[in-house]
Image (cartoon, rainbow, N blue to C red):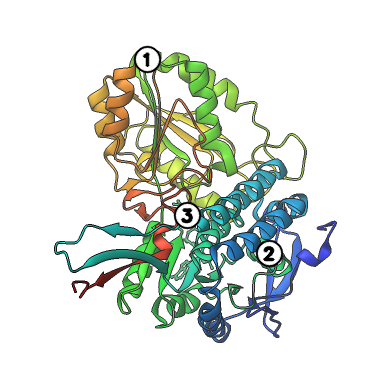
Amino acid sequence: MLVLNDSSLLRPGSYIDGQWQTNNQHLAVRNPANGELLHTIANSNGIETEQAVVAARKAFTSWKKTTANERASIMRRWFNLIMEHQQDLAKILTAEQGKPLAEASGEIGYGAAFIEWFAEEAKRVYGDTIPAPSGDKRIVVIKQPVGVVAAITPWNFPNAMIARKAAAALAAGCTFIVRPATQTPLSALALAELAQRAGVPAGVFNVVVGDNARAMGQILTSHPDVDKFTFTGSTGVGKSLIAQCATTVKKVSMELGGNAPFIVFDDADVDAAVAGAIASKYRNAGQTCVCTNRIFVQQDIKDEFTEKFVSAVKQLQVGDGFDENVVIGPMISTQAVRDVQNLVQESISQGAVVALGGDSHSAGDCFYQPTIMTNVSNDMAIAANEIFGPVSPIIAFDNEDEVIGLANDTEYGLAAYFYARDIGRIWRVAEGLEYGMVGINEGIISNAAAPFGGMKQSGNGREGSKYGLDDYLEIKYLCMGGLDK
Ligand code: NAP
């Protein structure tokens, strides 16, 4: 049973126009570690989604007129409340998503950091004056909120993927509707509870929870009163949502899938590379978009790296996220376990060799063993697909040009990592990788100050940093004429 210090963080259903919704349709939320029923909430659908759009449109008329300072102080209160309730929010997150409690607590802090960051950035939405081509004119550029923003978010970061978008939207003066993933609605509703307590006005932040993703998504991507749509999830779903947004030419930003290369050159600090690979691969049981997906190791240090990596990964404890010392929790579903197992099996049939793990884990139906595979090539199933599970394929390479080519040989371009010491090599490789984010001698790269986002089919737009507000602002050019006497 989920025991919280503040049990009112568990809400009954969607939060629309400042009101909690209930109905007779129920949605059961379960713990992936053991199948336990955590909470039952009202299952919303199209009607509530429409209501949320209407509420956000109405609220926009007044929210857009608030000053940056007013928005910043409300957001600051929201941030403070989240941090005050960090432990309860972490428990809700671990219970519905599975990640270890310390990691969940880290996600709460990480998500809150975006609210704090954008509360400050709200005050720095500067315009421009531009030298005009004739003396009787002046050119001025102002920035205004885009309007009503709709978002769909995934289950792997039930708090942070919402906070990262909502923070920028609210700071810019937009109003916001999010439809969280079906498996993880409780974290989203707890965020709404704290938004309400912080004084976020009714209709400014709305959460619609329901299991009919397609129908709810159809409304959010085609409703004429939604001005911008933002999505975090798989590339396949993202593509269809972009197409749906085309009918009303919405502004769109997308945080999609990845296939991150992790390259270890022969001048690298191998121990540091092992630690970085573990951090970037096995966090969240391998279920992050920036997770290492392919480990490339230069031929002459391949054996040393593999030996050290296998022995370090063997130490990682798998189990229920609430158990102390556990660092790898369950995967999100039994289907996710089957998908990973199929990729592993297919790659074995293609010639890959299991160096560690390679099967489901005895901790329960949703668990998979931390796995390392060698003798892998870049075209095998385990390297060509986004694994989204705790499996590391190791691919040997000979030289720099070859590995840059292999790393870039994918439709994805989200995160990449490499370990090297030679300064010339560091610049050449950093510039040669076709990825939106590159970790150099570093396996954990995301924070509120840095622009998060991908190239190629990993998406468009950036979240966090000084660039993160751009996706929520319109640029308006004012041409002032007739200035001559
Ligand atoms: P997904 O299947 O694309 O689902 C993501 C969200 O989209 C969920 O809320 C899902 O709802 C909803 N959805 C699914 N089909 C839909 C449809 N036809 N219309 C409208 N909404 C729909 O992705 P996932 O497998 O849950 O999440 C993992 C993926 O997200 C990976 O590819 C990962 O790389 C990516 N990701 C990217 C980032 C980033 O910042 N780039 C961050 C995290 C994750 P239901 O829950 O009801 O299915």
At a point 60% along the width and 47% down the height, the residue shown is 110
Residue furthest front as drawn: 485
Q: Amino acid at mark 1?
A: Asp
Viewer-closest of 205 and 51? 205
Query: Dots 2 and 1: beta carbons under 8 Å?
Result: no
For the residues labelled 3 and 2, the Cα–Cα distance comes to 33 Å
Determine which quarter of the picture holds residue 201. bottom right
Counting labels gives 3
- Residue 260: x and y, percent? 40, 39
Whether residue 99 appears in this view of the structure is no
Please name the residue that numbered disc 2 is placed on.
186
Numbered circle sitting on residue 266: 1
Q: Earlier in the sequence, mark 2 or mark 1?
A: 2
| Circle 1 SS class | loop
Q: Quadrant of residue 402?
A: top left
Q: Along the horizontal axis of the image, is 138 left or right of 50?
A: left
Q: Does 264 sit above or below residue 118?
A: above
Going by the numbered disc 3, the residue's amino acid type is Arg
Which of disc 2 and disc 3 is earlier in sequence?
3
| Quadrant housing residue 278 | top right
In this rendering, the answer to whether 190 lies above or below 424 is below
| Category of crowding for the residue at label 3, using alpha-carbon neighbours closer than 10 angstroms: few (below 14), some (14–19), many (at least 20) | few
Residue 156: x and y, percent? 56, 53
Front one among 466 and 347: 466
Q: Which mark is residue 33?
A: none
How many residues crowd around disc 2 within 10 Å: few (fewer than 14), some, or many (20 or more)? many
Q: Residue at x 33, y 18 (%)?
A: 423
Looking at the image, is 254 positioned above or below residue 400? below
Q: Give the number of the disc on residue 124.
A: 3
- Of tags 3 and 2, the one toward the viewer is 3
